[in-house]
Image: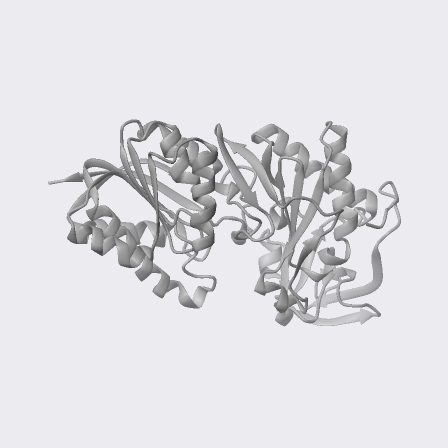
Amino acid sequence: MQLFDLDSTQDLCVQAEAVLNKGGGRFFKSGGLWIYDNEIARVDGTFRDGDIVRVLDYDRFFLGYGFINRASTIRIRMLSRREDEKVTPAFLRARVQAAWDYRKKVIDTASCRVIFGEADFLPGLTVDKYEDVLVVESLALGTDRLKELLLQALVGALAADGIKVRGIYERSDAKVREKEGLERVKGFLSEPFDTKVEITENGVRFIVDVENGQKTGFFLDQKENRAAIRRLCAGADVLDCFTHTGSFALNAAAAGARHVTAVDSSDLAIAQARENAVLNGLSERVEFLCEDVFELLPALEAKHAQYDIVILDPPAFTKARSSTKAAARGYREINLRGMKLVKDGGFLVTCSCSHFMEPELFAKTIAEAAHDAHIRLRQVEFRTQAPDHPILWDSEESYYLKLYIFQLVRG
């Protein structure tokens, strides 16, 4: 990787200005970080896509600095709102340091999300730390061009706290990169290393496959939610749906569940989950099934199966606002089926990880399922993503995970 002078105060902004339409920039002015293509009247000056430009309102009032990309509907991703806050290597290092300092205050940092894009004012960049390995996902052109500088700053921040990074792997293989005019890429950004990394969460050991696992290999956002369900699990029969690599299932088993049935449709995920069960000496109490949850739940209902706890942690059923209604039907279906499998007085843990499934709609969907199942819900907790995935108010894409724990009461 190229080495940068992170103390440099060289202004990285080019001599170009994007001027908004009258009435443009409403999302940005209300606290967001994006300016859309139809909000820009013109761009004065010479620039390349991915450059940092000055952004002015229609009356030339200064609004901030941001990355511009004509290939994207999100035309400008903002970095700073202050005219005297120039975007320099030193400025970017300070942003990275602030992200790390925040994590040290709010969460166990052995494995955590260190940078969470817009919520850390570093648009389009995600970095997950798995012990001494970093996994990076870059989804915006401007960020992509400064990726090495930002990673150098992060490695330095960690080193200052005695953490030596063993390796960096890139997982910029999401389809959404194509909307930025970027190719989907993955591979080493350091010397090659074993991409199966062992981590410990809530006392449970997991092998994280940073090369082939979903997203960056593990869903760190549920860390504290998995801890929250443990107190319910002693002596319980548990059904864990969409188990992925067994994270909820193994937390339940480690907390004393009598038996856990864990289900996922992915052969790779189930193989990894079994490996994790062996790693923790829990194979005898956790049964893994490679099946479609939507087909399995009615089959279990037909067999009159009953569980003390049912966990529903599905992938996002919608990644666009236009498909929200169809997603709501999917959430209603699995919750209806899941509720019917919970013993009277047992517990349902149910999640949505789509930010388009807004909290009010998710709650309404669950309520409809309970009504149709003739079940009353007693709410134990409502939770969101772990604090290393901070929710930035007025930046709706940063708030995506909703989790309810209910006790189910019949009659």
Name the foreground residue: 28 vs 383: 383
Q: How is the image coloured?
A: one colour
User: Can the viewer see residue 62?
Assistant: no
Where does the image place residue 117, in percent across and percent down from the top left? 63, 49
Residue 286: percent from left, percent from top: 35, 38
Residue at 41 percent of width and 66 percent of height: 323
Q: Nearer the viewer, residue 284 or 195?
A: 284
Residue 231's spot in the image, x, y percent? Answer: 35, 27
Q: Residue at x 17, y 45 (%)?
A: 375
Q: Decide which of 91, 38 is in the foreground and name it.
A: 91
Q: Is residue 318 left or right of residue 16?
A: left
Image quadrant where one finds the C terminus: top left
Say whether residue 341 is left or right of residue 226.
left
In the displayed image of the protein, which residue is found farthest to the left? 411
Residue 143: in sight, yes or no? yes
Task: Quadrant for residue 66, please give it.
Answer: bottom right
Point 45% across, 48% down: residue: 271
The residue under the point 67% across, 52% down is 170
Q: Quadrant of residue 332?
A: bottom left
The image position of residue 86, as x and y in percent, is: 81, 49
- Marks counted in the figure total 0
203 versus 35 height, above or below: above
